[in-house]
Image (spheres, helix red, strand yellow):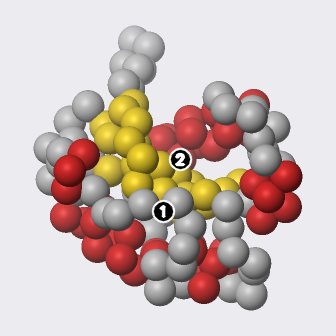
Amino acid sequence: MAAVSAATFQTGILLVAAQRELRRELFDVLDREGHPTIHSARDTTHAAILLEGRDPLALIVMVFDGDGRASATLCEQLRLLPACADVPIIAVLLDEAAVKPSQLPAQSAVGSMHRRSAPN
């Protein structure tokens, strides 16, 4: 991963994924990279509770799945939260996501996530 800025350490990262196992997996990746402030939310309501009264974030990492419509709506809703208003978004596309990078919200960077199959 890229070098961590001082702003990221001070203001934090919001991780958004509907599935708990994905939130945990991405949280662990960010935590291993040394990010001390990682907020993990399943949706906008959860994010609003976590971020109430907080300074603006440095980054949002959001999992997109399906056709991306629900995720795009979630992005629009997150932008209404003061801590998320102008924050860059890294959109993580699951293998089964039908959304194309050109359909992602403005200020988004794209990554993909290959899910490991669970051990038998």
User: What SS does tag 2 mark?
Assistant: helix
**Mark 2 vs 1, N-terminal side:** 2
**In the image, what residue type sits under mark 2?**
Arg
Label 1 Cα crowd, 10 Å radius (few <14 / some 14-19 / many 20+): some
| Left or right: where 33 falls relative to 101 | right
User: In x, y percent, where is residue 84?
Assistant: 57, 74
In the image shown, does 7 or 54 lie closer to the viewer? Answer: 7
How much space separates mark 2 and mark 1, taking CA atoms? 8 Å
In the depicted structure, whether residue 52 falls above or below residue 30: below
Q: What residue is shown with label 1?
A: 42
| Left or right: where 9 falls relative to 67 | right
Q: What residue is shown with label 2?
A: 23
In the depicted structure, whether residue 32 falls above or below residue 88: above
**In the image, what residue type sits under mark 1?**
Arg
Q: Is residue 20 visible?
A: no
In the image shown, does 71 or 49 lie closer to the viewer? Answer: 71
User: In x, y percent, where is residue 87?
Assistant: 56, 67
The numbered mark at residue 58 is none
Q: Residue at x 36, y 71 (%)?
A: 74
Question: Would you say the residues marked 2 and 1 are in contact, meaning their CB atoms lie under 8 Å apart?
Answer: yes
Q: Quadrant of the C terminus?
A: top left
Q: Quadrant of the N terminus?
A: top right
Q: How many marks?
A: 2
Instruction: Give residue 12's quadrant in the image.
Output: bottom right
User: In x, y percent, where is residue 44?
Assistant: 46, 75
Instruction: Give residue 75's quadrant in the image.
Output: bottom left
Q: Residue at x 18, y 45 (%)?
A: 100
Label 2 Cα crowd, 10 Å radius (few <14 / some 14-19 / many 20+): many
Instruction: Give residue 18's quadrant in the image.
Output: bottom left
